[in-house]
Image: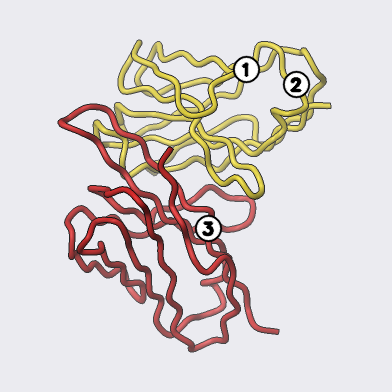
Amino acid sequence: EAQVTQNPRYLITVTGKKLTVTCSQNMNHEYMSWYRQDPGLGLRQIYYSMNVEVTDKGDVPEGYKVSRKEKRNFPLILESPSPNQTSLYFCASSPRWGGDEQYFGPGTRLTVT
Amino acid sequence: GQQLNQSPQSMFIQEGEDVSMNCTSSSIFNTWLWYKQDPGEGPVLLIALYKAGELTSNGRLTAQFGITRKDSFLNISASIPSDVGIYFCAGYMNYGGSQGNLIFGKGTKLSVKP
């Protein structure tokens, strides 16, 4: 089944403790991205990647890192999480170079205390 | 930055009713997308539109790419209880082959009439 998977689905952590949220897609898509979804603010893009070793900032990149060493994986790294990073995170991938027509994963709900 | 105005913010539906929602922008887009999000899930792509004036259907859903390229409409005919959820529009624009951004509306929440 064609899909985008994320792990973990739920995570509660403490301020400053480094964490990684994994994202994997099995559709051979070149474009992948990360979003956060917050009430009243909608979906905002954090980082995106157009291909292996090619990443760029989205609208809200501060406090996040990403890497794209393989086509199928695009992990999101929070080196020192803070409470304002409590949010619902979505990974997405697109078969189209420009990143339109994106397909989303199931989400990771992160709480930072 | 670019913003999408999606309306209505919320609406109640009764089974069998037709539903309409729309998105407008101050900027033009060359792609419009409509997504649905169920509680606890990621957005699911419903319809993609690539040409001004295009009208595309997916079952009971019909979406149109506005002729001005600044708006899009989604209609749901004969609604059923499983239509409940949040619907998002998204617009995409790139310039001369450069990387573009997908901009999302704030969503329209569909609920069942009590």
Q: Position of residue A3 (x, y in %)?
A: 42, 40
Q: Position of residue A35 (x, y in %)?
A: 52, 34
> Would you identify the image quadrant in which residue B94 lies?
top left
Left or right side of B36 for B55: left
Judging depth in this view, the residue of A85 and A67 nearest the camera is A85
- Residue tagged by mark 3? B107
Q: Which image quarter is the N terminus of chain A in?
A: top left
Secondary structure beneath dot 1 equals loop
The amino acid marked with disc number 1 is Gly
The amino acid marked with disc number 3 is Gly
Q: Earlier in the sequence, mark 2 or mark 1?
A: 1
Residue at 43 percent across and 30 percent down: it is A33
Secondary structure beneath dot 2 equals loop
Chain drawn in yellow = A
The amino acid marked with disc number 2 is Ser
Residue at 24 percent across and 31 percent down: it is A97
Checking the image for residue A63, the label placed there is 1
